[in-house]
Image (spheres, grey):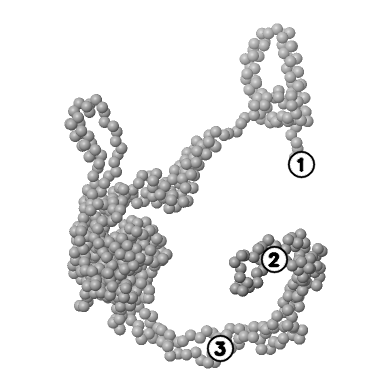
Amino acid sequence: MDQRVGLFILLAAGLLCLSLLPICRADNHLEDAIGDDVDVEDELDLGLAAADEEEEENGDMQDEAPPAPKSPPTPKVTYKAPEPMGEHFFAESFDRATADGWVLSSAKKDDADEDIAKYDGKWAVEEMKDTKLPGDKGLVLKSRAKHHAISAKLLRPFTFDTKPLIVQYEVNFQSGIDCGGAYVKLLTDTPDLDLDQFVDKTPYTIMFGPDKCGEDYKLHFIFRHKNPKTGEYEEKHAKKPDTDLRTYFTDKKTHLYTLVVNPDNSFEVLVDQTVVNSGSLLSDMTPPVNPPAEIEDPDDHKPQDWDERPKIQDPDAFKPEDWDEDAPAQIPDESAVKPDGWLDDEPEYIGDPDAVKPEDWDEDMDGEWEAPQVPNPACETAAGCGVWKRPMMDNPNYKGKWKPPMIDNPNYQGVWKPRKIPNPSFFEDLHPFRMTPFSAVGLELWSMTSDIFFDNFFITNDRNTAERWASDGFGLKKAAEGAAEPGLAAQMLNAAEERPWLWVVYVLTVALPLVLIVVFCCTGKKKSSTTPAQYKKTDEPQPDVTELEEDEENADEAEKSSPEEKSDEEESPAEKDKEKDVTADEKLEDDVLRRSPRSRKPRKD
């Protein structure tokens, strides 16, 4: 029983751990994210230092009164700006508190109304509204229902050769997001690139980042591929991620978005350093990079005598002579009889006798006033009111319109398709990774929500360098958020508010062990306390005694009586005769009880 109780307690503890797993998952990044360059202050040491100063000021008073115990303080994370290490093409943390190097667009959209055509959305470099890391600044989109465009030059153009492309930046939807995007564009390196005239039609090489409108949550990865035959560019869209992206838009937390494109044409899309989408530029883009080798001949047309009907009406079938197409589908039921008590002269509805014509009723304007109709009270107890009509029933002779049966078409030729011809535009590009070089990064956005926070843009061709930058920037933010997280009880309540089913887990985790302990520890089989003497006084059947039990009882009695027999030998013959008579009487009484019908077990036929 103790093993079962322990097993159920372990089971309950496992349920509690599973319920707390999504809550505590974010806390696991605290130690790994801080790194060697993060300055974490321990307020406990500061409290002890302050206590030492008070001892020096108060002198002997501290000896008389012992210091009160203090609760462990919450550690704080001090901000330190990330510094790029290793080869990189662009790094921006906005820690200079200015947007130096960024150019605001002064252009207008061609296909928009004059009121909203201008890119006049406001930008600012500031801290987050509810920052957990004082001193950390970023670029904030400040306007609603405006076009925004801002861009900056790279240190040097990025060329797609033998090294991968890694692009990463952070986004925080501080006020949530209704409809708008937070994606970046890597602007193509062209001679006429003018950041002051940056618009939606400015050529770009890659577009990457989150976008949302309504309930459609997207994480774009689009690249523009150049047709080697025509020289024209076509957008190629990556497949939609299988991961649910809703949380990244609604939790109002900072998230790190990373794109990795490798020279072997593979790509990865990561959020918070976790892969949410991956694939190949050759097989996982829409439309495909390479067109089909054959296409349908546009000049091929279906012949006029082509028969693609699999079934036709039997030309040899004729309508039977007794087929009546005019027979109605339903006819009156002639066997129906009007119920007794039917009131033919009473209408179903009558004018409300309590209704009164309104005083402002104008018969010239409103017509003759009539009382509103109400159910006739005389019909409540009757079988019915009004003119009785026979109910309708299905017509057994109804057959409907006759149609000849369908048979297989002897001339069926199948579904016609135009013939295939070689695709005159066919090409095979086995290295779509070799995209057009780009020399600037830009944000060209329309949003119905303000206060979108951008930070720590980084472009490189070395993954270790990108991970180090992410650890120094995003890792520090996660450490600060983890340090500011509420206690375990508050986290459990917050998690239950988001996922109400957790309340069931909490209740079962607490109540189930208690119930099981009570059931297994406080209950058990009760032993019968009925003595043989009580069976003699009642009609209750006495349980049978098996031969084995009788042998055991006889053996026990023999062991107990063995020392007494020796003493009996020393007794007088008169006492022995008296004991024999008593023993004989008891045996006789036992034999009578055993043979009694009440003590017999019923036989099973």
Q: Residues within 10 Å of mark 2 (few under 14, many from 20)?
A: few
Q: Quadrant of residue 443?
A: bottom left
Name the N-terminal-most of marks 1 and 2.
2
Expressed as whole percent of the image width and height from the top left, the position of residue 242 reads 41, 64
Asked if residue 266 is positioned above or below residue 78 in the image, the reply reads: below
Q: Is residue 141 visible?
A: yes
Residue at 38% x, 47% y: name it.
Answer: 491
Q: CA distance from mark 1 to mark 3?
A: 80 Å
Pointer 3 residue: 307
Q: Earlier in the sequence, mark 1 or mark 3?
A: 3
Disc 1 residue type? Answer: Asp
Q: Secondary structure at mark 1?
A: loop
Residue plotted at (49% across, 44% down): 508
Rendered residue at 67%/84% (across/down) = 404
What element does badge 2 sit on?
strand
Task: Residue type at mark 3: give it.
Answer: Asp
Left or right: 216 with respect to 69? right
The relative height of residue 337 versus residue 569 in the rendered view (above or below) is below
From mark 1 to mark 2, how far is it between C-alphas? 79 Å
Q: Is residue 434 above or below residue 17?
A: below
Residue marked by disc 2: 351
Compute the Cα span from label 3 to label 2: 67 Å
Q: Earlier in the sequence, mark 3 or mark 2?
A: 3
Residue 224 appears in view:
no
Residue at the spot of label 1? 605
